[in-house]
Image (cartoon, helix red, strand yellow):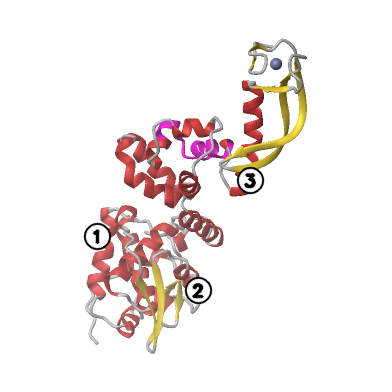
């Protein structure tokens, strides 16, 4: 045992006793009962055993009391703070800066210091990626541009809405999985492309579903005519009102940022959030979509229905059957429509 000063002996204690006992330990003006070890001077120079300050025992006792305090008041444990920081792939200093703490605050907390209630709340909030994104936006210059960009991408991927979106995409992928053939325009179904196309047309003028179905058909088939590949990989069925994407209701229902609204004339799509399609569509794809949009701009659902009924693919394919993309070569997009 190292030298421990005894106030009653007025010099370093000569005889010690280590006792394992239950006692109160005060944390922020509140006593917690803990079981720990304490050291006493048992010299016969004084009647009562005198407790001596022992650094290691005391910090162990303090740790136990802090843990009780943490449990009672929902304060994060050092390990939890460390895991949180690791989740965001940050150094202690970076995490401190982002949360607006002092430079070494996180380091102290990870080593066992008790967070203040206010900072504990900030730490807890930062568990949510969208909240962490707010802190990042506020303090990004403190961690440098490169780290900011990296964290931003990480947070985006952790956002619940993105996870939700990814879940839907995976589900749709399973439902619409097919081997590319003439009916899919020799392309695997690409729900993101399909969604971007719907978003494109919805932003332009919220088309009714009957019209949207045809716009989608013409975009995919015209794209095929030009580039020998479908744009979205969607399959189209010959329906009474013209060609429609297979299971279009399921597809439209699951597109983020687009809502299907009903009024007395039917259902139409409307883009409800500022989500852009530009980064998911190439220039030549947007060119085709623009062309199709302009071509049918002034036409009602019934006009475009009648227009599509003159297509060879509609005439030659049986009702409710898939339409082959091979018919795309017969499309005449310069054909005029006379009402
Ligand atoms: Zn003593």
Residue that extends furthest to the bottom in the rendered view of this protein: 264
On residue 321, the disc is 2
Magenta run includes residue 260: no
* Res 301 label: none
Residue 324 or residue 143, whichever sits in front = 143
Q: Which residue lies at the image location 45% right of the left edge and 49% below the top edge?
A: 129
SS for tag 1? Answer: helix
Does 81 lie within the magenta span?
A: yes
N-terminal of the pair, mark 2 or mark 1, is 1
Residue 249's spot in the image, x, y percent? 48, 73
In the rendered image, residue 253, in percent from the top left (x then y), is placed at 47, 70
Above/below status of 61 relative to 226: above
Assign a secondary structure to mark 2: loop
- The residue pinned by badge 1 equals 287
Real-space CA distance between mark 2 and mark 1, rounded to the nearest whole angstrom:
29 Å
Q: Is residue 91 visible?
A: no
- Of residues 226 and 211, the one drawn nearer to the viewer in this rendering: 211
- Given residues 148 and 335, the one toward you in this image is 148
**Spot occupied by residue 44 in the image (x, y as percentages of width and height):** 77, 14
Report ligand 1 position as a quadrant: top right
Q: Is mark 3 within 8 Å of ligand 1?
A: no
Q: Which residue is mark 3?
A: 71
Q: Earlier in the sequence, mark 1 or mark 3?
A: 3
Q: Quadrant of residue 220?
A: bottom left
Q: Is residue 301 visible?
A: yes
- Comes first in the chain, label 2 or label 3: 3
Q: Is residue 213 left or right of residue 55?
A: left
Q: Residue at x 72, y 10 (%)?
A: 14
**Which residues are drawn in magenta?**
79-94
């Amino acid at each position: 045992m190292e030298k421990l000063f005894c106030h009653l002996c007025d010099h370093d204690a000569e005889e010690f006793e280590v006792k394992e006992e239950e006692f109160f330990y005060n944390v922020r003006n509140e006593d917690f009962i803990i079981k720990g070890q304490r050291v006493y001077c048992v010299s016969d120079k004084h009647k009562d055993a005198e407790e001596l300050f022992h650094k290691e025992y005391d910090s162990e006792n303090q740790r136990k009391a802090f843990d009780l305090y943490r449990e009672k008041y929902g304060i994060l444990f050092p390990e939890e703070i460390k895991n949180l920081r690791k989740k965001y792939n940050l150094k202690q200093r970076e995490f401190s800066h982002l949360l607006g703490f002092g430079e070494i605050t996180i380091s102290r907390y990870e080593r066992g210091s008790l967070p203040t209630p206010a900072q504990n709340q900030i730490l807890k909030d930062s568990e949510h990626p969208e909240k962490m994104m707010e802190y990042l936006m506020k303090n990004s210059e403190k961690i440098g541009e490169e780290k900011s960009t990296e964290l931003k991408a990480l947070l985006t991927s952790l956002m619940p809405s993105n996870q939700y979106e990814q879940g839907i995409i995976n589900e749709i992928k399973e439902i619409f999985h097919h081997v590319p053939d003439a009916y899919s325009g020799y392309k695997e179904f690409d729900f993101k492309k399909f969604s971007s196309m719907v978003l494109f047309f919805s932003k332009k003028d919220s088309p009714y579903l009957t019209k949207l179905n045809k716009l989608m058909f013409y975009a995919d088939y015209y794209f095929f005519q030009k580039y020998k590949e479908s744009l979205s990989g969607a399959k189209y069925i010959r329906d009474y009102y013209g060609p429609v994407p297979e299971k279009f209701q399921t597809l439209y229902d699951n597109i983020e940022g687009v809502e299907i609204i009903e009024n007395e004339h039917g259902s139409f799509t409307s883009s409800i959030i500022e989500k852009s399609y530009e980064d998911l569509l190439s220039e030549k794809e947007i060119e085709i979509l623009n062309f199709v949009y302009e071509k049918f701009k002034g036409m009602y659902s019934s006009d475009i229905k009648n227009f599509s009924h003159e297509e060879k693919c509609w005439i030659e394919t049986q009702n409710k059957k898939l339409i082959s993309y091979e018919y795309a070569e017969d499309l005449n997009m310069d054909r005029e429509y006379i009402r």
